Amino acid sequence: MSYQYDESVDGPIATHDKATVVAQLRAAIPELQLLHEREALRPFECDGLAAYRTTPMLVALPDHVDQVVALLKFAHARRIPVVARGAGTGLSGGALPLEKGILLVMARFNRILDVDPEACIARVQPGVRNLAISQAAAPHGLYYAPDPSSQIACSIGGNVAENAGGVHCLKYGLTVHNILKLEIVTIDGERITLGSDALDAPGFDYLALFTGSEGMLGIVTEVTVKLLTRPQSAKVLLASFDDIEKAGAAVAQIIGAGVIPGGLEMMDNLAIRAAEDFIHAGYPVDAEAILLCEVDGAESDVHEDVARVDALLRAAGATDIRLAKDEAERQRFWAGRKNAFPAVGRVSPDYYCMDGTIPRRELPRVLKGIEALSNEYGLKVANVFHAGDGNMHPLILFDANATGETERAEALGAKILELCVAVGGSITGEHGVGREKINQMCAQFNGDELSFFHALKAAFDPDGLLNPGKNVPTLHRCAEFGSMHVHHGALPFPELERF
């Protein structure tokens, strides 16, 4: 064994002979399935962010907790890095493997262990699909609230790792607000319970710390989620605007009036046209922007809120407002929004999905800023927003086969994220940092804050073996990146003053 600097992980990691590791691991855990032939490893080279690809040294496919414990003890003893992977739908390179590491795939942990309708909770394994939880709870009139657009495929373990949200997170919260307890295994093989079945647990809130930690602190083996009662009524309004800034301003006006919609989503014209061509949701393709606003709850309350929102949208400049006439049309309206990403993929050879979060009041200004950056870099941007909570998903359209376009797309994406920070926002809302945004972490946080993050990481994983090179950059990397720290500092976007 020797130590060699690997530029992909911000530090030295152990280099092992692959054949030796495979032989030793098979001897230590005979029943554990391993993949190590190159062709068998290729499907695991990336997550949903396909721009970054690395072939892992080997893939481990455990199917019970004892195997996970034994594998982590094995890796810890030999200082072999471990990257956890769920369904592979992540969009930030968080599950990108290492050539010198083990990829721990938790897809076989796919059982719903228990649904307790009286306590309104469910115990599930991390490989269970997000949507499958609601399907299992449906006979009891219950559901699991977070609903990312990938919910038909993404796993709950990955949702915990990235603190996923969805179109209804404005009212019902992100993953961190909808889980009660986690069973995890640390890098040295210790099994730990975080949280409890009660509404609160004694001691520090390690559950919140772990949620969104991107596989850097431990491996999730079980999740206890909260289940909610299905609302008695849900209505969706679709509002058209002839100006995208008016639509952005309408969002703040709705929230400012005291209405908290179940969902409040925004799409610009490029996204509208793509989604309508793909889903036929009934979107107005001549609108510059649309807002989808869902209000839910008791029938009488919904009726009153629909009237209030309708009036607010008209006052904000909506050119047309449609109320879904039935449940089928409501589902079509949401299908268009939830399929916006694949829809855009049908009109461009490639697209790059960003994930920044901004204060709602800054929506009009940031939209103007994105338009200016789009013109500067010569690439179209389709804007799709969880507008109610300020979580943006600009989709940068490009052609990877065209010389220089990939680099321009990455540079444009970085500028959009730095713009988010400049107006008081964040570089991510639910996709995570992963490998994709690690340089922009240098713009979001100062040296003292990054050092604190490293100290938290070291408390769980002192040797830095779990998902190294992700999420938190080294101070050396930030110095090389040369980023201005806009946190506590001057804005790096003086042109914003014009908007």
Image: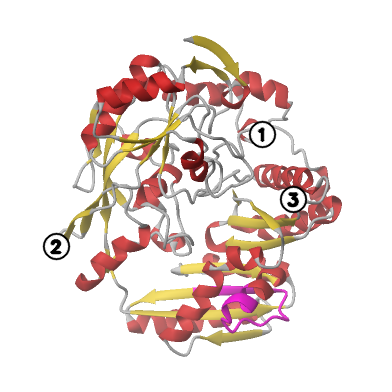
Q: Which residue is pictured at 29% across the width and 61% down the height?
A: 133
Tell me, for residue 118, which label it has, or none: 2
Of residues 436 and 13, the one drawn nearer to the viewer in this rendering: 13
User: Which numbered disc, 3 or 2, marks the residue closer to the eye?
Assistant: 3
Q: Earlier in the sequence, mark 1 or mark 3?
A: 3
What percent of the width, then of the height, locates residue 274? 66, 72
Residue 193 place in picture, x, y as percent: 23, 35
Mark linked to residue 43: none
Q: Residue at x 48, y 68 (%)?
A: 263
Q: Are marks 1 and 2 in contact (CB under 8 Å)?
A: no
Q: CA distance from mark 1 to mark 3?
A: 27 Å
Label 1: few (<14), some or many (≥20) within 10 Å? many
Q: Residue at x 32, y 62 (%)?
A: 132
What's the amino acid at mark 2?
Glu
Report whether residue 40 is seen.
yes
Question: Is the residue marked by circle 3 packed among few (<14), some (14-19), or many (20+) residues within 10 Å?
Answer: some
In screen coordinates, is 481 left or right of 433?
right
- For the C terminus, the image quarter is bottom right
Q: Amino acid at mark 3?
A: Ala
Which label's residue is closer to the chain start, 1 or 2?
2
Of label 3 and label 2, which has the lower sequence position? 2
Disc 1 target residue: 443
Rendered view: 294 above or below 396 = below
Tags 1 and 3 touching, CB below 8 Å: no
The magenta stretch is 275-293
